[in-house]
Amino acid sequence: MISVEEARAIISGTIKDFGISSVDLDDAVGRVLREDFSADRDFPPYNRVTMDGIAIHTDSFEPGKAFPIAGVAAAGAPQLSLQSTEHCLEVMTGAILPTGCNAVIRYEDLLISEGTAQVQLEKVNPGQNIHDKGEDRLEGSLVVKSGRVLSPAEIGVAATIGKAMIKVSRLPETIIISTGDELVTVDQQPLPYQIRRSNVHRLKATLKQFNIEAATEHLVDDLDVVTNRLKAIIEEKELILLSGGVSKGKFDYLPEALDRLGVKKLFHRIAQRPGKPFWFGQAPNGALVFALPGNPVSSFMCTQIYLLPWLKSCLGLPASPQPFGVLQKDILFKPDLTYFAQVKITYDKAGKILAHPVEGNGSGDLANLVDADAFIEIPRGKNEFAAGEIYPLHFYR
Ligand code: AMP
Ligand code: MG
């Protein structure tokens, strides 16, 4: 059995880059960019009118002056030219500024009648209501650097520079496998000695947050069946998430099956509660095997504490900052294990994070997870933990 710290270090040692894939612009939000975005033209690409109104040249402006309207420049129309500075052109937001003009006056500041626009302003400044060509970014300049997590803001920029396909971190080919003869599918009515396979769906939901569409499968508790099926799966998949079958029960065949297949055990069992039976290893072809405990709370906690930080690093997502919470109730915990206690979170007036233990009935009590928000990491080395003490928090919502 190894410590939580050792387990974290071993898992970190297997962090790898799954490479780059190209995705459609509309599927790229939340992904990690793996190319630079440079401006393919100036931003904006032409002197852009920013208000509906008229364009004039300020040299011929005087307060109260009326300009005959010589034409209309719509957005999307080629550039017009003002032939005489005594005239004006009507211009619409988004239109290219006509040549010979250097200012735009809003309709709100005009009186228009019989083809003439009379200006109601005392002063007109050169450049007003014009978004200058290249004012925001120049052609060729870097707009978004590789490594950025794409938010809707970056998607807008990508569209503007004509990126229909975007290079992002490739996601690992992933499968989630449940084991156990007591498990039935969600749509089945379980017999009195059966339960529904919740871990699979919970894991699938977790991975969906990273845009990973994992395959799912169920294996019965039979050493040969498990071994044969895993053999094929290891060849196809890069990330294999198993649940159940790694404890000390008679039908917990996974460690033996994985051993037969040459999957290198990097550790089995961590000095922690919940989640002690966690088995972790790597196949000769590099496929990673997270064999999580079957108990729903254990499996959930191992996913949050070990799998997700690893996955984030592999994909180039930033690590979450480490928050700390103030324990709100004494905890007595005697085993020499790191204790990941479930806590409900509130905040005091100063914004301090308060962690209220929500005890529940142990690692099978998945309903208790609904009442809590995070795990608080209570270290080994002592038995009594007093209200007011501060420990690391691992939020799951
Ligand atoms: P095991 O590690 O296979 O001994 O399983 C430990 C406990 O977790 C047993 O009570 C199982 O019924 C339960 N369990 C295993 N897999 C799942 C699953 N996919 N969904 C819900 N409970 C499970
Ligand atoms: Mg089992």
Image (spheres, helix red, strand yellow):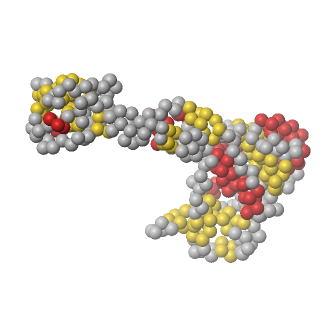
Q: Based on the displayed image, in which of its 4 quarters is residue 341 positioned?
A: bottom right
Q: Nearest the camera: 69 or 306?
A: 69
Please report the residue visible at 81 percent of the width from the left and 54 percent of the height from the top.
Answer: 266
Residue 140: x percent and y percent? 48, 38
* Residue 260 shows up from this direction: yes
Name, please, the residue furthest toward the left. 64
Residue 374: x percent and y percent? 60, 59
285, above or below 276, in the image: above
187, above or below 313, in the image: above
If the image is split into quadrants, where does the C terminus sit?
A: bottom right
Q: Nearest the camera: 77 or 356?
A: 77
Residue 336: x percent and y percent? 77, 70
Please report the residue visible at 80 percent of the width from the left and 62 percent of the height from the top.
Answer: 2
Q: In the visual, does 143 lie left or right of 256?
A: left
Q: In the visual, does 217 lie left or right of 167?
A: right
Please report the residue visible at 44 percent of the width from the left and 34 percent of the height from the top.
Answer: 41
* Residue 371 shows up from this direction: no
Please report the residue visible at 20 percent of the width from the left and 37 percent of the height from the top.
Answer: 105
Q: In the visual, does 322 lie left or right of 259?
A: left
Q: Nearest the camera: 170 or 103?
A: 103
Q: Based on the displayed image, in which of its 4 quarters is residue 165 positioned?
A: top right
